[in-house]
């Protein structure tokens, strides 16, 4: 059996406690002390460390912060290890250290192995590790919502519950998809109209890659046509005028030819000028031909500008490039095709839903039958425990009901019923502590003593099957004494063989059974009161039991204390 326990608890500057440290036993830890000594402060500190709400008033007067620390052995617990691993928190030596700092500003900080965590993360770890039972708090078993999990733990049907929960999640996922399809159906006509319009708009544009750059170039030319023609004519005049470049080159060529006849050294110059003359003549002809081809047409310019504006509009609407426009068109076509296939998708989802509903209903009914057929065994065991703890003719019932829900797809006996992660049953434990009284909810038990014994009886049976290994009882023995106190003591001792227990008590019958006993007492130093805690050795334990028995230390009370301790071993 993996063992999880608090090995050390340190409290600093909390309420009346300046500094105290408890090295706890893995079995039954008893905290005792006179009324008002501060016993419950330890439990308050532990509760806050484990995630309870804190108040700035709980910081010791004059201090800036209170520091609460617990070292916990987790025995390689896979759930804790996995959870902390996901948080990036390393575990060394199978131990984790929880720390909570309460600041005078009203804020608090929580840490696991030195890594700061949220209060939610701290509370989750605490829920795995500890089972906290206060004198009047809303503890787990008083909340009827938890009863179904306790019953299933007792029945050991974890595998069936796990399968049911898979189907529950699958069923809800399919329902959400169908709801989304229905929502899409109502918007379908408008969406189809929009998609068809966008596809048509893009396809009509007949986009050609690079055309936008060509359009810009043509628009530039046509917009400057008059200037181009004027400049071309001016250039043509420079070439063809009587005193233009061509005639000047022609004269130069002729003169060079005459020089070459007189001196052969000018022959190359003549050849170069002749080549240059013909090249310039070609350039002149090309310019004249190009200008003659220009046909200035205002309508054509308007068409170019209009097409360019269309491209700009599409880019602004569907993206900054032709690639994004064309991609949007393909996406719209696919979406349109998918919408056409929605009916097929709906039929497919309905088939999946029908299968999941069928499977969920089958397993939920099997679980419901198991609960009904075996709940009497739990009832009998709890009644035996309550009788042992001093209740005369108690009655205990496991109340199984279902809640109708007309919107639910799950049918029990033809009736639509509410379904959850745990099936369709609603489970509540009902009890009558005394003969002749009707059974009622645990939360309606008025007597503190009765409630204490009921909780202990339930945990004695149900606690064996839960994962929690440390139980904390804050004066669970209130309102009891005599033989009942001995029975309660025996039951707590028996429970401590499987779980670590931290128990505040005022009863010597319970304190005598402690594997580790701690005494809380007040001291006044330099006019300042503080609560101190002392771990008792065997002699000190006998003295404390004697005080609890008679209120004072006498030879007789010490003898009785020793006899009580011996009788309980």
Image: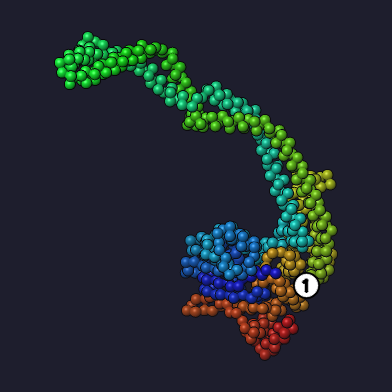
Query: Coloured how?
Result: rainbow
Give the image quarter of residue 551. Answer: bottom right
At horizontal 48% and vertical 61% (from top left) the residue drawn is: 105
Q: Quadrant of residue 35?
A: bottom right
Say left or right for 79 vs 255. right
Q: Is any atom of residue 248 visible in this view?
A: no
Say which of 320 and 473 sits in front.
320
How many dots with numbers? 1
Residue 117 position within the rendered picture, expressed as x and y whole percent measured from the top left: 55, 59
Q: Is residue 418 left or right of residue 126?
A: right
| Residue 218 position by quadrant | top left
Q: Is the N terminus in the top left, top right, bottom left or bottom right quadrant?
A: bottom right
Closer-to-camera residue (168/39): 168
Nearer to the camera, 391 or 360: 360
Q: Quadrant of the C terminus?
A: bottom right
Q: Secondary structure at mark 1?
A: loop
* Residue 67 place in picture, x, y as percent: 52, 68
From this view, report whether residue 161 is shown above or below residue 435.
above
- Decide: few, some or many residues near mark 1? Use Cα within 10 Å; few <14, some 14-19, many ≥20: many
Find disc 1 in the rendering and name its residue. 389
Farthest residue toward the top? 242
Q: Residue at coordinates 56% horizontally, 68% vertically from top-left? A: 92
Q: Is residue 177 left or right of residue 382?
A: left
Question: Which residue is found at the position 46% from the left and 19% from the top?
Answer: 306
Q: Residue furthest left?
A: 262
Residue sitting nearer the eye, 477 or 213: 213
Q: Where is residue 542 shown, x and y percent of the image?
A: 66, 84
Q: Residue at x 77, y 48 (%)?
A: 360
Query: Residue at the bottom extreme?
Result: 555
Rendering coords of residue 249 (x, y %): 22, 15
């Amino acid at each position: 059996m993996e063992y999880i326990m608090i090995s050390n608890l340190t409290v600093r500057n909390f309420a009346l406690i300046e500094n105290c440290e408890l090295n706890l036993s893995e079995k039954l830890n008893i905290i005792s002390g006179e009324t008002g000594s501060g016993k419950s402060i330890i439990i308050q500190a532990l509760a806050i460390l484990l995630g309870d709400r804190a108040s700035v008033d709980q910081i010791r007067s004059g201090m800036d912060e209170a520091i609460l620390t617990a070292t916990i052995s987790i025995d390689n617990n896979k759930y804790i290890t996995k959870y902390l691993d996901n948080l990036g928190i390393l575990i060394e030596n199978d131990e984790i250290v929880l720390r909570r700092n309460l600041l005078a500003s009203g804020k608090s900080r929580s840490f696991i192995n030195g890594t700061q965590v949220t209060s939610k993360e701290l509370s989750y770890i605490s829920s795995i590790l500890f089972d906290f039972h206060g004198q009047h708090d809303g503890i787990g078993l008083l909340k009827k919502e938890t009863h179904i999990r306790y019953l299933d733990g007792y029945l050991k049907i974890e595998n069936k519950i796990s399968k049911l929960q898979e189907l529950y999640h699958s069923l809800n996922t399919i329902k959400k998809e169908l709801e989304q399809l229905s929502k899409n159906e109502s918007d379908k006509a408008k969406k189809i109209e929009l998609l068809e319009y966008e596809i048509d708009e893009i396809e009509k544009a007949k986009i050609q890659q690079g055309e936008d750059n060509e359009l810009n170039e043509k628009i530039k030319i046509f917009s400057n046509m008059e200037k181009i023609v004027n400049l071309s004519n001016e250039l043509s005049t420079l070439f063809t005028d009587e005193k233009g470049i061509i005639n000047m080159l022609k004269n130069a060529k002729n003169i060079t030819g005459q020089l070459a006849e007189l001196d052969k050294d000018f022959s190359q110059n003549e050849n170069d000028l002749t080549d240059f003359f013909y090249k310039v003549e070609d350039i002149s002809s090309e310019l004249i031909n190009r200008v003659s081809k220009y046909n200035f047409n205002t309508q054509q310019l308007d068409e170019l500008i209009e097409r360019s504006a269309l491209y700009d509009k599409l880019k602004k609407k569907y993206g900054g490039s032709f690639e994004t426009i064309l991609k949007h068109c393909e996406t719209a076509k696919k979406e349109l095709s998918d919408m056409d296939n929605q009916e097929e998708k709906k039929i497919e989802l309905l088939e999946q839903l029908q299968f999941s509903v069928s499977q969920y209903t089958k397993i939920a009914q099997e679980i419901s039958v198991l609960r009904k057929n075996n709940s009497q065994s739990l009832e009998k065991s709890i009644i035996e425990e309550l009788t042992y703890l001093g209740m005369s003719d108690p009655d205990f019932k496991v109340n199984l009901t279902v809640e109708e829900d007309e919107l639910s797809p799950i049918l029990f006996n033809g009736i639509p019923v509410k379904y959850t992660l745990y099936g369709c049953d609603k489970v509540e434990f009902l009890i009558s502590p005394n003969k002749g009284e009707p059974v009622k909810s645990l939360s309606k038990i008025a007597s503190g003593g009765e409630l204490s014994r009921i909780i202990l009886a339930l945990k004695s049976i149900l606690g064996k099957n839960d994962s929690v290994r440390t139980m904390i009882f804050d004066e669970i023995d209130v309102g009891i004494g005599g033989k009942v106190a001995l029975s309660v003591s025996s039951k707590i001792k028996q429970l401590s063989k499987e779980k670590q227990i931290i128990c505040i008590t005022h009863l010597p019958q319970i304190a005598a059974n402690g594997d580790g006993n701690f005494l809380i007492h007040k001291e006044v130093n330099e006019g300042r009161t503080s609560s101190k805690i002392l771990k008792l050795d065997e002699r000190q334990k006998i003295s404390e039991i004697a005080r609890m028995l008679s209120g004072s230390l006498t030879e007789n009370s010490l003898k009785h204390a020793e006899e009580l301790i011996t009788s309980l071993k």
